[in-house]
Every structure is written in C-alpha cells, then in structure tokens.
Amino acid sequence: QNSVQAITQSRDGYLWVGTQQGLARFDGVRFEIFDGEDSAALKRPYIWALAPARDGGVWLGSEEGGLVRHVNNTFKGYTKADGLASNWVNAILEDRNGDVWVGMIDGGLAVLRNNKIIAIDSSAGFKGKNVFALAADTGGEVWSVQTIDPELAMYITGGPKVFKGKVLVGNGG
C-alpha cells in the first residue's frame, strides 16, 4: 500500500509528497521519485512528516529513518547515532531562527541547532514521549501536540494552530 502521509511546498515551488514507499517531487508536470536507492539516508522510506527549509531545501521525518534534509539533490540524515532519542520522526518545524524542531514517537522533542541535536526533556519542562504535531505562532513560539489518551478511543490530529493568541488543537475522535 502506498498512501500519502505528508505534503509540503518548497520555496522554489516544488510540491513534495511523502508516502509509505518514499518521497516524490512534483514540478507541475511530472513526479520525480526518491527512495532508498537514491540515498542511504532514505533506507527507511516511510515518510511521516515534511517541512520546507528556509534555504529552499526540505526536511523529512521518517519511520525508523530519523530526520533527513534534502537540499541541492543531496540527502543528509540525522538518527539516534547523531543524538536523536528515537528514529521515528513524526513532526518537523523549522522556526524563524533556522532551528529545526523534531517531534518523535518514543523520543519526545529535540531541536537541531547549529548542526547539533539538543534533547528537550523534563529539565526544560517537557514531559512527553510522543510528539504528533508542531506549529509556531507569528512570534516564533513553538507549540507541540504530545499526547494520546489511552483511556479514550480517539487521538489528537493535525498541527496546533494559533488563533487570536490561543492554541487550537483538533481532535480526530
């Protein structure tokens, strides 16, 4: 099965599509497919999250493949070996300062700053293990959705949105 899991548009106008079998770039006429044969960084091609990079590249989050950056036809991967707490990246956000926030399953939250991964843990007031969505308001403050309620047959869906100073979170039920 090959389903679309994430879509984003890079600054150069390309539409990027993350699927269960890899990554595709649409130029308005045709799709170019990227998979594990294109780069070792895509060896686990199940793409859960995509985010545009400020420099025109694209950030990818994959199941068991970590965080991957694509720019100038080159892929660079960041995994547990580089400091991520988990290789299952579920949410990505590049903020206005160029810091890349990474939400993980069983890994919580981290930030890639100056090419170094920094864990955001309980010492910073963050207590979650699972991050499903990230968003930033116009002031640059980052918000995360980090919970599944095991008592209810529903889960949080979509990224939080900031509206008139309040954080709104959808519930997929």
Image: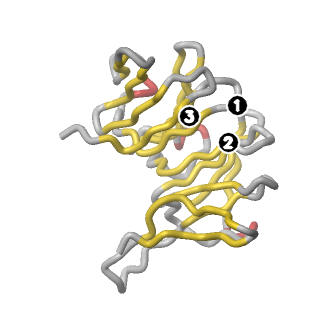
Q: Is residue 60 left or right of residue 38?
A: right
Secondary element at image label 3: strand
Give the crowd class for mark 2: few <14, some 14-19, many >=20 residues within 10 Å.
many
Q: Which three-letter amino acid code belongs to the residue tagged 2?
A: Glu
Q: Quadrant of the N terminus?
A: top left
Place of residue 48 in the rendered image (x, y in percent of width and height, measured from the top left) = 41, 45
Q: Residue at coordinates 28% horizontally, 33% vertically from top-left?
A: 21
Between residue 110 and residue 149, name the one nearer to us: 149
Q: Residue at coordinates 36% horizontally, 86% vertically from top-left?
A: 151
Secondary element at image label 1: loop
> Label 1 vs label 3: CA separation?
10 Å
**Pointers 1 and 2 in contact (C-beta within 8 Å):** yes
Q: Is residue 12 above or below residue 52?
A: above
Q: Residue 94 got which mark? A: 2
Task: Mark 1 or mark 3: name the one nearer the start of the chain.
Answer: 1
- The part of the image, by quadrant, that contains residue 116 is top right
Q: Which three-letter amino acid code belongs to the residue tagged 1?
A: Arg
Q: Which residue, given by chain and number where applicable, does mark 1 sit on?
A: 54
Q: Residue at coordinates 55% horizontally, 66% vertically from top-left?
A: 145
Which residue sits furthest left? 1
Q: Which residue, given by chain and number where applicable, does mark 3 sit on?
A: 59
> Label 1 vs label 2: CA separation?
8 Å
**Pointers 3 and 2 in contact (C-beta within 8 Å):** yes
Place of residue 58 in the rendered image (x, y in percent of width and height, measured from the top left) = 56, 29
Between residue 81 and residue 72, name the one nearer to us: 72
